[in-house]
């Protein structure tokens, strides 16, 4: 009975993963296909669609915009997440659970609701839609992720390390800068990479708040109206997929490194 249940679970997981990732696997297949028609059978191998990406100036402008937005949003989100995580793991204050809950609300809100709400607020305040409006929206949705990652990094630290540094004459600020910050640095880097990846791939909020300065996902959406350009979109999707995988794997490596470093520091402190 148990063996039959295990086989069913294995088959279910395999079917689920196939359903989830099969469309993604089609991206590189058609990106190298020598045909403007995205359909089987394949016509041959070509790199022309990737060369076309190098010759498309609107794509370059959208890429620059996305890199600017993702970089600024990643650093701002990580800075805000750092403050929130430090406060949540080291201090007790009135309304702590409620405040942390409000920070996490963007995780459960539909992005279309967030995008429309920000659009209304920005326009009613008299501001123009530009890259900064997109950054504002991306910081809002990335900060909860950064807070969760950094809360884990801070929670794994032993408070005795801080107390020992203060007993040796360090101030709270220098203790944070010279002791705590180096220990959680892998977690900070993981937070930056995760926020960068989320911002780079985010479409809905960027669609509502971009104005005339489009980001890469918005540019890709605009190209889907032209069937002849679909192969180049597939090539671009393949590049973005590779970049996202590299960033996510790097973020996971840094997160685990932060946990291992914190555990080693705690073991040394306890010893």
Image (cartoon, grey):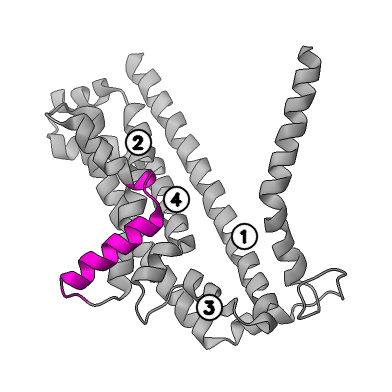
Say which residue label 3 marks: 222
Is 140 a magenta residue?
no
Residue at figure coordinates x 28%, y 35% from the top left: 180
Q: Is residue 112 above or below residue 21?
A: below
Q: Specify start and end residues of the magenta stretch as a single range.
A: 106-127
Q: CA distance from mark 4 to mark 2?
A: 19 Å
Q: Secondary structure at mark 1?
A: helix
Q: Earlier in the sequence, mark 1 or mark 4?
A: 4
Say which residue label 2 marks: 183
Give the image quarter of residue 171: top left
Q: Earlier in the sequence, mark 4 or mark 3?
A: 4
Is 110 a magenta residue?
yes
Give the image quarter of residue 158: top left
Q: Earlier in the sequence, mark 2 or mark 1?
A: 2
Q: Which mark is residue 194?
A: 4
In the depicted view, which residue is nearer to us: 245 or 36? Answer: 36
Q: CA distance from mark 4 to mark 3?
A: 26 Å
Say which residue label 1 marks: 242
Q: Secondary structure at mark 2?
A: helix
Residue 241 appears in the figure: yes
């Amino acid at each position: 009975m148990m063996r039959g249940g295990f086989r069913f679970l294995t088959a279910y997981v395999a079917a689920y993963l196939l359903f989830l990732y099969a469309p993604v696997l089609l991206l590189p297949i058609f990106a190298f296909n020598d045909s403007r028609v995205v359909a089987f059978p394949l016509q041959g191998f070509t790199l022309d669609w990737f060369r076309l990406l190098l010759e498309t100036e609107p794509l370059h402008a959208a890429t620059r915009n996305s890199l600017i937005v993702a970089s600024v949003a990643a650093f701002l989100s990580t800075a805000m997440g750092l403050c929130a995580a430090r406060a949540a793991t080291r201090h007790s204050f009135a309304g702590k659970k409620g405040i942390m809950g409000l920070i996490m609300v963007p995780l459960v809100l539909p992005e279309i609701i967030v995008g429309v709400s920000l659009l209304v607020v920005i326009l009613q305040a008299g501001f123009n839609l530009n890259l900064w409006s997109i950054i504002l929206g991306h910081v809002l949705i990335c900060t909860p992720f950064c807070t969760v990652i950094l809360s884990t990094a801070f929670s794994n630290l032993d408070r005795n390390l801080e107390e020992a540094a203060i007993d040796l004459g360090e101030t709270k600020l220098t203790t944070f800068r010279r002791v705590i910050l180096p220990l959680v640095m892998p977690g900070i880097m993981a937070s930056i990479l995760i926020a960068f990846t989320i911002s780079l791939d985010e479409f809905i909020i960027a669609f509502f708040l971009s104005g005339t300065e489009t980001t890469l996902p918005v540019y890709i959406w605009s190209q889907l109206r032209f069937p002849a350009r679909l192969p180049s979109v597939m090539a671009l999707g393949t590049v973005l997929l590779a970049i996202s995988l590299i960033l996510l794997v790097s973020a996971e490596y840094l997160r685990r490194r932060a946990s291992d470093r914190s555990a080693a520091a705690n073991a040394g402190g306890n010893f």
